[in-house]
């Protein structure tokens, strides 16, 4: 990835999480000074343990719901990659108050801290859930529907706040609407585990995975390296590309049945018995949208985004990582 980004001081919030820790690693490889802020609500200490010995890495254990922690973390920082959030549609349906406190209150704290500490640019994890009940495919940034979950509401509010701060205070902001990100270091355990690591773990243990509905819901599954590329490009993008939002995806869609077929094929190279594991079908999940497929034209045109990992290529890399690490 030819991106000229080095010797910058960059804060990654949620830096011990799945996406955040991968971003920290990549930024350190490029000789940047990296500050990581995390409270381990969903992030994991082991994700950043190898980084703690790097003299260019600073870890702050703190909570974005605390403005003082945000001010401390942004001190002297040029750029922020804001990944900290409580993900998961089902979690937000079960506990909308905490999702709002973290995703909206915490987000606003980060914006205020960036304003007060003269941060140059604030790049944040937005979400494809913002498209809500819009049935238009592919999803284009300027056409959204009504949110279908508390989580989706919080992520849309983030975009509104970022727009207001860019117009009112001159803070450069870029929102990246992630589409179903997967890859190395994504946790397969817990009540709100993402579907790909969960399926991988179950198949590796010769357990039957449960698919919500008939398996014909489709998603634009996006490998972690595509997401890293979009974040780095957002940091170096010129001014004509800021103060807006972009889809971050591969630009294709596959059904859950497709996904399981690929997973069984790739995992059976490690254990042939996996091919025989049966799939169980359960009810559709509340708050889920039936189909998701991103147009990535805007990111290609303004950020020079060029995703390299299709679902199949990403799954092969992810499966290899899980087989070695689970």
Image (cartoon, grey):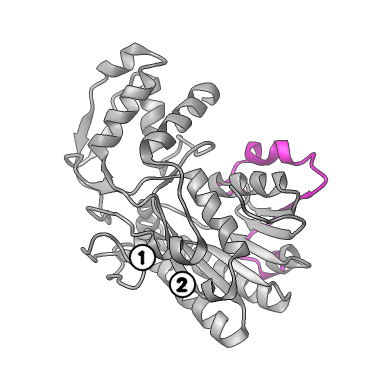
Q: Residues within 10 Å of mark 2 (few under 14, many from 20)?
A: many
Whole-percent x, y for residue 125 in the image:
50, 60
- Residue placed farthest to the bottom in the image? 168
Residue 119 sits above or below residue 52 on the image: below
Q: What residue sits 28% from the left and 54% below the top?
A: 292
Which element carries disc 2, helix, strand or loop? helix
Q: Is residue 97 visible?
A: no
Asked whether, in this view, residue 70 is left or right of residue 20, the answer is right
Picture quarter containing residue 266?
top left
Q: Nearer the viewer, residue 140 or 321?
A: 140
Q: Does the stretch in magenta take in 209?
A: no
Q: What residue sits 73% from the left and 74% below the top?
A: 117
Q: CA distance from mark 2 to mark 1?
A: 9 Å
Q: List the residue tagged with mark 2.
A: 159
- Residue placed farthest to the right in the image? 55
Q: Residues within 10 Å of mark 1 (few under 14, many from 20)?
A: many
Whole-percent x, y for residue 88 in the image:
40, 52
Q: Which residues are magenta?
A: 40-69
Whole-percent x, y for residue 211 in the image:
25, 37
Residue 158 sits above or below residue 214 on the image: below
Q: Earlier in the sequence, mark 2 or mark 1?
A: 1
- Residue placed farthest to the left in the image? 214
Q: What residue sits 44% from the left and 73% below the top?
A: 157
Residue 145 sits above or below residue 4 on the image: below
Q: Does the stretch in magenta take in 48?
A: yes
Q: Nearer the viewer, residue 44 or 274?
A: 274
Q: Confirm or deny contact between disc 2 and disc 1 (CB under 8 A).
A: yes
Which element carries disc 1, helix, strand or loop? helix
Whole-percent x, y for residue 72 in the image:
75, 65
Asked whether, in this view, residue 74 is left or right of residue 268, the answer is right
Q: List the residue tagged with mark 1.
A: 130
Q: Is residue 141 visible?
A: yes
């Amino acid at each position: 990835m030819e991106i000229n980004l080095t010797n910058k001081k960059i804060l990654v919030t949620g830096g011990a999480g799945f996406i955040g820790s991968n971003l920290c690693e990549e930024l350190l490889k490029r000789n940047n000074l990296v500050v990581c802020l995390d409270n381990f609500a969903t992030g994991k200490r082991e994700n950043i343990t190898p980084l703690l010995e790097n003299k260019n890495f600073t870890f702050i254990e703190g909570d974005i719901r605390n403005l003082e922690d945000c001010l401390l973390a942004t001190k002297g920082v040029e750029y922020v990659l804001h990944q900290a959030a409580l993900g998961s549609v089902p979690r937000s349906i079960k506990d909308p108050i905490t999702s709002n406190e973290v995703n909206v209150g915490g987000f606003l704290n980060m914006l205020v801290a960036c304003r007060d500490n003269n941060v140059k640019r604030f790049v944040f994890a937005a979400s494809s859930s913002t498209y809500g009940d819009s049935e238009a495919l592919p999803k284009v940034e300027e056409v959204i529907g009504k949110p279908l979950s508390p989580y989706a509401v919080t992520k849309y509010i983030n975009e509104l706040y970022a727009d207001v701060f860019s117009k009112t205070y001159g803070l450069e902001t870029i929102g990246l609407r992630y589409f179903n990100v997967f890859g190395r270091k994504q946790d397969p355990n817990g009540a709100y585990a993402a579907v790909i690591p969960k399926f991988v773990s179950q198949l590796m243990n010769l357990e039957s995975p449960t698919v919500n509905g008939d398996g014909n819901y489709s998603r634009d599954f996006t490998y972690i390296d595509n997401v890293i590329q979009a974040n780095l490009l957002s940091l170096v993008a010129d001014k004509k590309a800021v103060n807006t939002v972009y889809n971050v995806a591969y630009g294709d869609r596959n059904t859950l049945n497709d996904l399981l077929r690929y997973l069984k094929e790739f995992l059976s190279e490690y254990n042939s018995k996996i091919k025989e594991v049966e799939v169980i079908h359960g009810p559709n999940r509340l708050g889920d949208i039936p189909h998701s497929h991103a147009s990535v034209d805007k990111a290609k045109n303004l950020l020079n985004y060029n995703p390299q990992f299709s679902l199949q290529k990403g799954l092969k890399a992810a499966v290899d990582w899980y087989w070695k690490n689970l």
